[in-house]
């Protein structure tokens, strides 16, 4: 960054762009959804359908939370909620880019409706450096990314790591090293 110039908190939206929500379930060929609740209902009805499955799995971006499945549909639904809210993609002249939404997952009574948003809060000290679990997690990821045999585990999360690099200033040094290790293959 150039000193004295601050980056925008959210990228500018171009006029005429339509935000869409894309299903990231493995091998899902569905079109984009205009409303995030439509995407959520699609996941519940088409991917975690109670008439189709005996054991339920989460296949959101190759998620491995239930490797052998779970007979309890509600447990899988509660887990799938951790993948939401999904950020909309903006379609403009054939290109797609992600933008941050300002929509809060907290309702008027202060409850979060089961939605966990991992990208908002990072504990930091007075200098803006990360503390606690976020720091420990980023250091572990950095150390794991050094070994070539672990690199295939990072493939599904490279985009999220890049977004966190841009949004979490306190973690940026460690995340930059992690991404550098991934690209040095």
Image (spheres, grey):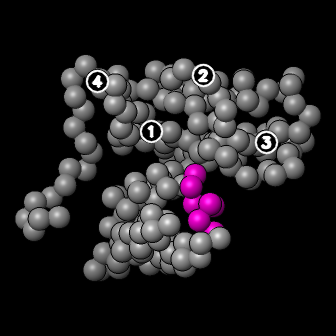
Q: Where 125 falls versus 96 (above or below)? A: below
Closer to the chain start, of discs 3 and 2, is 2
Q: Position of residue 159 (x, y in %)?
A: 46, 51
Mark 4 vs mark 1, foreground winner is 4
Q: Where 64 falls versus 24 (above or below)? A: below
Q: Name the residue under label 2.
A: 30
Crowd band around label 3 with a 10 angstrom C-alpha radius: few (<14), some (14–19), many (20+): many
Q: What stretch is highlighted in magenta?
A: 150-156
> How far apart are labels 3 and 1 at the CA level?
22 Å
Q: Name the residue under label 1.
A: 87
Mark 4 vs mark 2, foreground winner is 4
Q: What is the magenta segment's predominant secondary structure?
A: helix
Closer to the chain start, of discs 3 and 1, is 3
Closer to the chain start, of discs 2 and 1, is 2
Q: Please, what secondary structure does the residue beneath circle 1 have?
A: loop
Q: Name the residue under label 3.
A: 57
Q: Position of residue 135 (x, y in %)?
A: 47, 76
Q: Mark 4 points at which residue?
A: 93
Q: Please, what secondary structure does the residue beneath circle 3 have?
A: loop
Which residue is found at the position 79% from the left and 42% from the top?
57
Q: Please, what secondary structure does the residue beneath circle 4 have?
A: loop
> How far apart are labels 4 and 1 at the CA level?
19 Å
Q: Position of residue 69 (x, y in %)?
A: 85, 46
Taking depth in this image into account, of 40 and 53 the one nearest to the observer is: 53
């Amino acid at each position: 960054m150039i000193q004295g110039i601050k980056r925008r908190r959210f990228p500018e939206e171009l006029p005429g762009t339509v935000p869409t929500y894309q299903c990231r379930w493995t091998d899902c060929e569905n079109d984009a959804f205009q409303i995030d609740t439509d995407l959520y209902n699609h996941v519940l009805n088409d991917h975690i359908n109670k008439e189709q499955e005996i054991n339920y799995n989460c296949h959101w971006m190759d998620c491995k939370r239930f490797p052998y499945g779970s007979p309890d549909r509600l447990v899988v639904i509660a887990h799938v909620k951790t993948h939401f809210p999904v950020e909309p993609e903006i379609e403009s002249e054939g290109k797609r880019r992600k933008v941050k939404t300002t929509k809060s997952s907290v309702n008027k009574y202060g409850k979060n409706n089961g939605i966990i948003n991992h990208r908002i809060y990072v504990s930091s000290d007075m200098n803006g450096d990360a503390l606690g679990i976020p720091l420990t997690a980023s250091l572990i990821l950095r150390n794991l990314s050094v070994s070539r045999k672990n690199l295939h585990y990072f493939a599904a999360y490279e985009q999220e790591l890049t977004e966190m690099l841009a949004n979490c200033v306190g973690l940026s040094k460690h995340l930059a090293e992690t991404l550098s290790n991934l690209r040095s293959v």
